[in-house]
Image (cartoon, grey):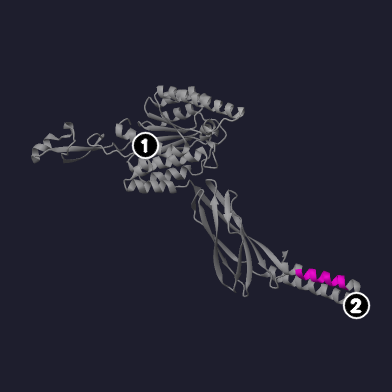
Amino acid sequence: MRPAPRLFWLLGGWLAWAVLASFWPTLITPWAVGGVVLLLFAALDGWWAWRQAPPRIVRKLAHSLPVGVWREVLLEIENPLPQKSVIRVFDHYPSACDMEGLPLTFTLAPQTRTRAPYRLRFTARGEHSFVGIEALIDSPFSLLHRRVFIDATHCARVYPNFAAVAKYALLATDNHLSRIGVRQRRRRGEGQSFHQLREYREGDTPRQIDWKATARVNKLVSREYQDERDQQIMFLLDCGNRMRAKEDGSLSHFDEALNALLLLAHVALRQGDAVGCMSFGHDTRLVPARKGRAALNHLMERLFDLEPGSNSPDYRSAATHIAKTVHKRSLVLILTNLRDEDDEELRDAIEVLRRRHLVLLASLRETAVQHLIEQPRTTLEAALEAAAALQYISIRNTTIERLKRSGAHVLDVTPAMLPIALVNRYLDFKSSGAL
């Protein structure tokens, strides 16, 4: 039980009466009687409030939510009492949330129910638990508040924000991937897998002509090819300490890499390829390659709560594990944040992988380093920082050249450009038949 504002006002009046009684002794007896009456009323009010049935409160929330997006949480409240009830409600939401709209105040008629929303925005992926709901209920005379804690545990799964992936998917459905920077090349007769026969068109090469079909119909018929399907992509996702980097309040490098992974997985699955993933560096999870519509959902279910840790990535161990478990030739795509000290270990890992697989290393470039180079150098400290940044980039470029000579394809891009760069390079591999 807690005192209500009305009780404080009455106590204030009783104390003011005490001040007057100090000047006029005839008021002392009425003042003492008033205090006893107030105490009895407060005790009776508290006893009635304690015996009353608490309100029934239900929280309604989607089981799966996107990170970084505002979503409504609906609270449904029922007053079981035969009299009007004033209820203030506060929901104990997870700590990894931004909130708007709490606490909520309801004035409910006898034995009625109502509902009201408030908004949450999750700031981290993973599973998050709601503990319960706290309610303050006015007593019958509004002298006290009864505090009630209602056990309403709820587990919400927070996934990466797939709004961008959905936008790309819609554009892909309309065959407009070029609008987002993904190059679509329509090629005649240069694919890897036979698609269909059609009439000869100007520009077809002589080797496209099917002479047997031409003889049967007495006109030129060409073969049309398409990119080979039934290929395989395996992602190696770095969960080491470098992927925790975050720039300008944006997503971490790990979240950017995860979003890029999901976009490319979506595009590859639409192309008829199989997609799998293995995380390394902190939390090792292996998702075998799968095809079909359910493959992307399966991938999201396995990776939605994955977070980078404080360990350094072990590229050699990850490559050895992939070489032992993935026997079909695949495009192995390593998503990481490259450092010059990784040179020797990465070359060893690439050597293990390239015996059977096509290897693409995608490294996230820190935009903060480029900002140091571009900013005006008005002080000695700024000049030294710019010189250090230039040296860092020079060493990084040298490391990338060594990795290319060891047989890997390398992408060195900013986090914002990673999704489109990955899809374009994948389409280049498909069109060239390299995979």
Q: Position of residue 430 (x, y in %)?
A: 32, 35
- What's under tag 2, amino acid-wise? Thr
Asked whether 300 or 27 is in front, the reply is 27
| Magenta extent | 9-20
Asked whether 66 or 418 is in front, the reply is 418
- Label 1 neighbourhood size at 10 Å, few (<14), some (14-19), many (20+)? some
Horizontal side, residue 11 vs residue 239: left or right: right
Which residue is at 11% across, 35% downward?
Answer: 212
Question: Magenta stretch mostly in which secondary structure?
Answer: helix
Q: Indicate the quadrant where residue 265 lies.
A: top left
| Cα distance in 3D space between marks 2 and 1 | 95 Å
Horizontal side, residue 65 vs residue 104: left or right: left
Q: Position of residue 122 (x, y in %)?
A: 54, 50
Looking at the image, is 19 positioned above or below residue 283?
Answer: below
Secondary-structure class at tag 2 = helix
If the image is split into quadrants, where does the C terminus sit?
top left
Say which residue label 1 marks.
Answer: 424
Residue 318 has which mark?
Answer: none
Say which residue label 2 marks.
Answer: 26
